[in-house]
Structures are given as C-alpha cells and as structure tokens.
Image (cartoon, rainbow, N blue to C red):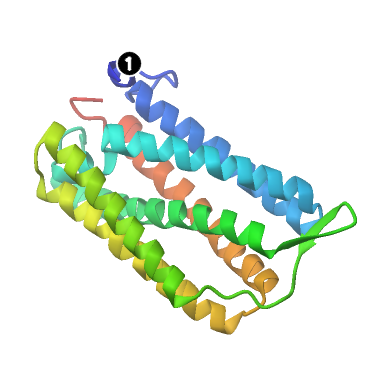
C-alpha cells in the first residue's frame, strides 16, 4: 500500500490515498443524491440498483481504506500532519474529525441496514418494484445475533491489527466505539420500528436520515481534507 502515500492527483499537499478517498466520497455522495431523487420521482428500480450497488461499493472501499490506512486512529493520536496552531487543532480540527469518524461508522452501519431493509420491504406488482406497506419488525433474537456477530468481528479485527501493528489504546477505543455504535443504532432502529411498523414508512424515514448523514459526512470530510492539505498542510502533507 506504499503507493497510497505518494503525492496525490489533485495538486494539493495530499497523498494519493487522501485524494482517492476524497474523490470516492464525492462520487458516492453524488450517486446517493441521484438515487434519492429517483425514489422521489417513483423510479423504484433505478433507485434500488443505484443505492444497492453504490452502498456495496462504498462499504467495501471505505472499510478497506480505514482499516489499512487507519486514518481516524492516526489523526487523533497526535498533531503530526496538521500545520495549524495547537488551539485550532484541539478546538476545530479534532472535533470535526471525531464527528466525521462517528458518522462514518453510523453511515456504514446504515448502508448495510438499508440494503437489508430495502430487500425485505420491497414487493413486485407485475414487473414494477415498489415498497410494501405491511408491518415489518425485527425480533430481539435477531438483534442480539447482529450485535453478537458485530462484537466478534470487531474483536477479531482488533486482534489481527494488534498482532501486526502492536497494541494501541486509541485503536481499542475505535473498535470498542464501533461495537457501541452498532448497538446504539440498532437500539434506536428498534424504537423506530414501534413508531413505523410499516416497512415502507420506515424505509422512507430512515432513507432520508441516511441521506442527511451522507451529506454531512461529505461536508465534514471535505472540511478536514481542506484543513489538512490546503489551508494548514503539515510535515507529512
């Protein structure tokens, strides 16, 4: 993965990895906005395939990127790479970055959930795809299985990273945060199930929520990119 540390293609102080991440974030955000407008216009099949393929690609790309590059972990372990003042770093850059990392995890969880919910809530009338208004609830047993499998996966990934790169309290906090956020999101989703038993209503409501998350993610990601590689480039920029 050494090529990710080479100079990027946008002409800033960013590395190839940072420029690639920013480019893919722009593409995915645009794709999701287009897909959302397709749904608003009743073009269900176009919406389905845009979101399904886009979310799978996004989950695959950013999971690999954050695991290999450890962007969030490295960025909050010290001021290396940020050329601004310590006060700006502590009170502006780090809070934005922390919000961004939290939203990344929520966004990835919601992507997987929305894919599953989309398939569960859909039905076909002739050859036309549409949402089914019938009640659609997830049992507590299934929720427990999801949290359990997520915990096992996070612990496995942490053990693998620890064996290859050494133990870090920050890394542990990131993986522990992943487990907590998954449980938190599922807890909220379970509550929302009681408010919107209809799979169709829930898909629309959570779809809008997920779109807001992705748009805010793009803004926070672009802000950190601009601060790191354009406004205040550091020694590794």
Q: Residue at x 45, y 35 (%)?
A: 61
Left or right, residue 150 beside residue 218: left
Which quadrant would residue 71 be assigned to in this image?
Answer: top left
Q: Residues within 10 Å of mark 1 (few under 14, many from 20)?
A: few
Decide which of 167, 82 is in the foreground and name it: 167
Q: Quadrant of the C terminus?
A: top left
- Residue 187 at what x, y percent from top left? 41, 74
Q: Residue at x 52, y 53 (%)?
A: 111
Left or right, residue 197 beside residue 159: right
Decide which of 114, 137 is in the foreground and name it: 137
- Residue 195 at what x, y percent from top left? 57, 83
Q: Residue at x 35, y 67 (%)?
A: 183
- Residue 102 at what x, y percent from top left? 34, 56
Q: Residue furthest right?
A: 126
Q: Which residue is mark 1?
A: 3
Q: Quadrant of the N terminus?
A: top left
Q: Residue furthest bottom?
A: 194
- Residue 50 at what x, y percent from top left? 67, 43
């Amino acid at each position: 993965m050494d090529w990710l540390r080479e100079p990027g293609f946008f002409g800033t102080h960013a590395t190839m990895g940072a420029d690639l991440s920013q480019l893919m974030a722009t593409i995915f955000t645009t794709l999701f906005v287009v897909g959302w407008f397709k749904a608003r216009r009743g073009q269900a099949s176009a919406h389905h395939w845009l979101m399904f393929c886009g979310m799978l690609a996004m989950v695959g790309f950013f999971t690999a990127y954050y695991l290999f590059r450890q962007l969030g972990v490295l960025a909050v372990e010290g001021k290396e790479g940020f050329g601004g003042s310590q006060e700006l770093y502590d009170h502006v850059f780090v809070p934005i970055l922390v919000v961004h990392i939290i939203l990344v995890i929520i966004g990835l969880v919601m992507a997987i959930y929305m894919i599953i919910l989309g398939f569960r809530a859909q039905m076909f009338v002739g050859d036309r795809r549409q949402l089914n208004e019938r009640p659609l609830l997830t049992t507590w047993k299934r929720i427990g299985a999801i949290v359990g499998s997520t915990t096992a996966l996070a612990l496995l990934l942490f053990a693998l990273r620890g064996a290859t790169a050494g133990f870090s309290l920050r890394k542990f906090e990131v993986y522990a945060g992943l487990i907590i956020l998954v449980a938190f999101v599922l807890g909220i989703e379970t509550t929302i199930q009681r408010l919107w038993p209809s799979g169709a209503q829930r898909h629309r409501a959570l779809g809008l929520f997920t779109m807001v998350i992705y748009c805010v993610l793009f803004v926070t990601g672009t802000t950190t990119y601009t601060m790191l590689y354009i406004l205040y480039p550091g020694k590794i920029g």
